[in-house]
Image: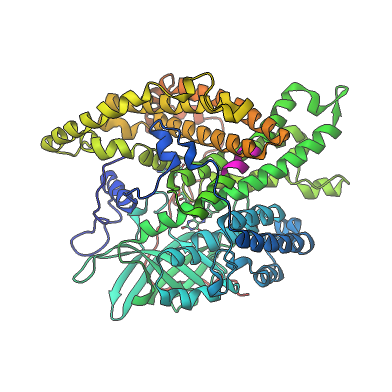
Amino acid sequence: MSVTDDRPAELAPDGEPATTHVDERQARQVAEAARETTWRKPSFGKELFLGRLRLDLIDPPPTPEPEVAARGAEFLAKLRAYAESDIDGAQIERDAFIPDEVLRGLAELGAFGMKIDQSYGGLGLSNLDYCRALTLVGSANPAIGALLSAHQSIGVPQPLKLFGTAEQKQRYLPRLAAGEVSAFLLTEPDVGSDPARMSCTATPVQGGYWLDGVKLWATNGTLATLLVVMAQVPASEGHRGGITAFVVEGDSPGITVERRNAFLGLRGLENSVTRFHQVFVPTENVIGREGQGLKIALTTLNTGRLSLAASCVGAGKWALGVARQWAAARVQWGLPVARHEAVAQKIAFIAATTYGLESLIDLCCRLADDDRNDIRIEAGLIKLFASEKSWQIADELIQIRGGRGYETAESLRARGEKGIPAEQILRDLRINRIFEGSTEIMHLMVAREAVDAHLSVAGDIIDPGATLGRKAKAGARAGAFYARWLPTLGVGRGQLPGGYADFGALAPHVRFVERAARKLSRETFYAMARWRGKMERKQGFLGRVVDIGAELFAMSAACVRARISGDPAELELADLFCRQSRVRVDALFTALWHNTDGVDVRAARRVVEGRYAFLEEGILPLSDEGDWVSTWEPGPSTVEDARRRL
Ligand SMILES: Cc1cc2nc3c(=O)[nH]c(=O)nc-3n(C[C@H](O)[C@H](O)[C@H](O)COP(=O)(O)OP(=O)(O)OC[C@H]3O[C@@H](n4cnc5c(N)ncnc54)[C@H](O)[C@@H]3O)c2cc1C
């Protein structure tokens, strides 16, 4: 969590990107430079971490324009009919392949242009309906949801919508709306969470750039005809340099799709290793400006992360349906298994959490559509919370299903039972905790934003690299800020017995959220005072702070939704969710200061040094074939192109 520094990625003096010897500080500077540093709009999440429950920012949630809502409803009805009649999810899973006719059918419906404005031939759906569509179509097969989401949330349409020139939009958006598939290529063998190591280069030449490099794990990469590619431009005369985003024609000479990758889940995913060898990209294909690539990627992801959460909501709904029916039908020890307390707890968790997740996604989409609020913290929280919680839901579902949970749908069907793919859903969901910002990175990212208010006044005090003079100035600034701010954390509406009475039976939960937000802020402040510059290394602490924030946000969303609905069943679900969430929050608060974090860090060091290698004896040794991380040599491809053409 280093202090804001707007410098672009460090480049070596000879103009080559300094990719192989990027130290920790440089890596952080690159991430820092990509951050949006200003807050122009209010943020519920930011206020929450500062100890202020600003319900007015989310209650009532914005409502979509009637015309937009009607358009969305019409599309959703068509998509549902198509998914029911024409998408065979089991076949996609078996063949690890989404048939051409399904992709064409989706294109005809306009599914590739859901987020593209009508003026470019798209459907111009709201985020709310886009996410509902992904929830729906992902329930037919999650790989289709991932394909559409990668295409529209991180692929070419969204960065062009936000940062493209009029000419770029005119040229590419109609093609994409009509069904051409796009992909987003940032990751490389040596670039995962840390983009500073990027070795793909864009060398300025007459009229454009030469792209060289190898990109890994590009979802849709085997199919895509338009790519967003992130590459390092070396700084030189007339070139600011830095990581830059380009729109690239997938068919450009010099591009080879070298492999289609296969995974634990999402078997239908069309995911590639793609090589670029002296691929010419004209200057007009730069998105934004040179050096803005990561900022563009991060801004794009703000709303992009909502679509990942939408697929998690779909999984929760599906798990709930299976749990409800199966646990009532399956009788063991004289009772339906739903009546055994251990199983009942799991069913209640699935129901409550699905309600919490849906409330969150619904609220975040409305906030994104309304555009009055900054949702970067909320989008991070929902990505984190939905991917973690839906994974737990799938795991609990498998337990409820017993041996059948572990059996494949095909095997179940072959024995004459319902082909319920619980194990597939578990496998399909697992990636959500890794891509589009892993859980560990989301913790750091949200924590960085959450304590931004502190850093903006106290940043230099806790920056180990700041001079004494800067630290002293920051100390004076911080003193004035905290003198005003700290007293506000002592008392609040959450302590009044009648506070938030308009929430009826849910009022105690809202009061809890208000008190917990203030407590969270106090604990964060205390930790900053205690650890100062070392705070950024306290990932266990920061992760729990963020997890508490996510729970409080989810409780707020559930209470607001249930109060507005007034439906007794919804009020029950919101109450259930909040009760469970409060238990988790209490445990997280306890673990802030009672944990094994320091011990674990020291133990991990000893593990890595090999002190406990004896514990690995008694099994066959690991194969020593291949490298841990592959390296690549520049030059033309030596393998056959694995591209899939529609
Ligand atoms: C199925 C699939 C689809 C994908 N689709 C795309 C795509 O379309 N486009 C694209 O560009 N990429 C894509 N990716 C790549 C994906 O975004 C990366 O896997 C992800 O960013 C994590 O990078 P990594 O796997 O290299 O993990 P690493 O960065 O090597 O991380 C390894 C572990 O260390 C943790 N870690 C790393 N840094 C830190 C830190 N500072 N603090 C704490 N923990 C840390 C990580 O969380 C993780 O647990 C895809 C990957 C998969 C598997």
Q: Nearer the viewer, residue 423 or 44?
A: 44
The magenta stretch is 355-360
Which residue appears at 55% of the width and 43% of the height? 60
Left or right, 338 with respect to 23, comes to right
Which residue appears at 44% of the width and 27% of the height? 612
Which residue appears at 57% of the width and 74% of the height? 121
Query: With respect to residue 479, does 257 lie above or below?
Result: below
- Main structural element of the magenta stretch: helix, strand or loop? helix
Q: Is residue 356 magenta?
A: yes
Residue 505 at least partly seen = yes
The location of residue 192, given as percent across then percent down, is 42, 51
The location of residue 232, given as percent across then percent down, is 32, 63
Q: Tell me the quarter of the picture where residue 105 sits.
A: bottom right
Residue 581 at least partly seen = no
The location of residue 386, given as percent across then percent down, is 57, 42
Q: Is residue 617 magenta?
A: no
